[in-house]
């Protein structure tokens, strides 16, 4: 079943604060949470899916499962597989990180070297980054002076949803 964090993300999508979700998870919990609030997301979990997807500007909600889906045997899970993405995934990640803000929830930045590299190579920092951590620090593998951090044990993204829905902190940083 989706957690409070999955449901909070779904509420942010429903309230139109978020349109794109990049997830490293293989499960379908975020998709379930989105469906529960009436959102039918476009799911992309392969390079071929990226090539066949609508342009980002025409998608109400995209779930980009960069490491694959558990029902597809092509999931990426080893250190070598997580180090580099193919050109289609790299291209869409570059667009997303350049053109949208970023809320990081439940990711330490330690293992997904290819994803961390995509964030780091972003040529601009036009939009805010909010990092919900479990504890005081962002993962050892990733540090950013551009990220606002919050301890998700005290504010499990749900507080962020509440603030946004009340018109507070809507800029996410």
Image (spheres, rainbow, N blue to C red):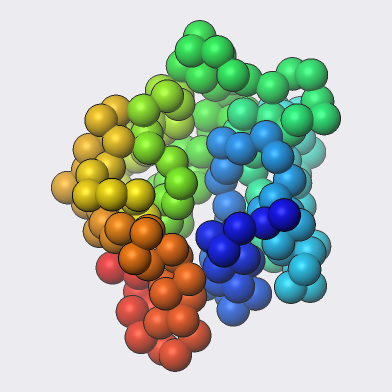
Q: Position of residue 75 (x, y in %)?
A: 69, 22
Identity of the residue furthest to the bottom in this view = 166
Is residue 94 rendered to the left or right of residue 138?
right
Q: Quadrant of residue 109?
A: top left
* Residue situated in front as seen by the camera: 128 or 124: 128
Is residue 38 rendered to the left or right of residue 170?
right
Res. 137 visible in picture: yes
Res. 55 visible in picture: no
Residue at the image position 76 percent from the left and 57 percent from the top: 32
Q: Position of residue 62 (x, y in %)?
A: 67, 53
Residue at the image position 43 percent from the left and 41 percent from the top: 107
Residue 152 in the image: above or below residue 107:
below
Identity of the residue furthest to the left in this view = 145
Is residue 146 rendered to the left or right of residue 120?
left
Q: Position of residue 30 (x, y in %)?
A: 67, 53
Residue 69 in the image: above or below residue 34:
above
Residue at the image position 45 percent from the left and 65 percent from the top: 157
């Amino acid at each position: 079943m989706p957690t409070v964090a999955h449901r909070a993300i779904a509420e942010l999508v429903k309230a139109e604060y978020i349109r794109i979700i990049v997830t490293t998870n293989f499960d379908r919990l975020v998709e379930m949470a989105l469906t529960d609030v009436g959102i039918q997301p476009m799911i992309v979990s392969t390079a071929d899916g990226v090539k066949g997807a609508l342009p980002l500007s025409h998608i109400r909600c995209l779930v980009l499962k960069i490491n694959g889906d558990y029902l597809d045997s092509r999931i990426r899970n080893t250190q070598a597989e997580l180090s580099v993405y193919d050109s289609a995934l790299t291209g869409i990640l570059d667009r997303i990180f350049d053109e949208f803000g970023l809320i990081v929830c439940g990711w330490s930045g330690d293992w997904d070297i290819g994803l961390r590299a995509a964030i780091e190579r972003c040529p601009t920092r036009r939009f805010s980054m909010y990092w919900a951590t479990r504890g005081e620090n962002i993962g050892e593998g990733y540090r950013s002076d551009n990220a606002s951090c919050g301890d998700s044990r005290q504010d499990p993204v749900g507080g962020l949803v509440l603030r946004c829905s009340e018109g507070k902190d809507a800029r996410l940083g």
